[in-house]
Amino acid sequence: MPDELRRFFWDVAFEELTIEKHSRLIAERILNYGDMNAIKWLLTWAEQDFIKTIVDNSRNLNAKSKNFWKIMLNRLPE
């Protein structure tokens, strides 16, 4: 993971995070707190269906983030 994402993972061992093992945590954190560069990075590896599933089912997204991403994902082409 790019080092500039470290600030979004203040409470975990950043060096141990991998997309293969921690994809849900990584996506949730970026959807909640990420900036434009973090979102762009997320979209390079995360499928739209995966992100929609996170938005629909996550208990870790705050209400504002969840609402925002539901609106934004409905605007994206399939």
Image (cartoon, grey):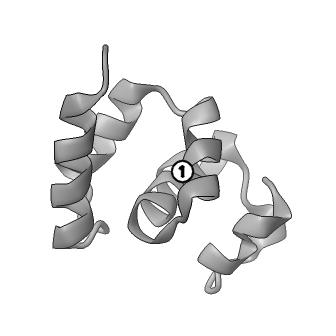
Residue for point 72% across, 59% down? 17
Amino acid marked by disc 1: Ile
Residue for point 17% across, 45% down? 71
Residue 66's image quarter? bottom left
Q: Nearer the viewer, residue 14 or 40?
A: 40
**Circle 1 crowding by C-alpha within 10 Å: few under 14, some 14–19, many from 20:** some
Query: Residue 14, relative to residue 19: is it above or below?
Result: below
Residue for point 81% across, 56% down? 2
Q: Position of residue 40 (x, y in %)?
A: 59, 44
- Name, please, the residue furthest toward the bottom: 11
Residue 7's image quarter? bottom right
Query: Residue 45, relative to residue 19: is it above or below?
Result: above
Residue for point 37% across, 39% down? 51
Q: Is residue 43 left or right of residue 20?
A: left
Q: Secondary structure at mark 1?
A: helix
Q: Position of residue 29 (x, y in %)?
A: 48, 65
Q: Nearer the viewer, residue 13 or 47?
A: 47
Per the image, the residue denoted by label 1 is: 39
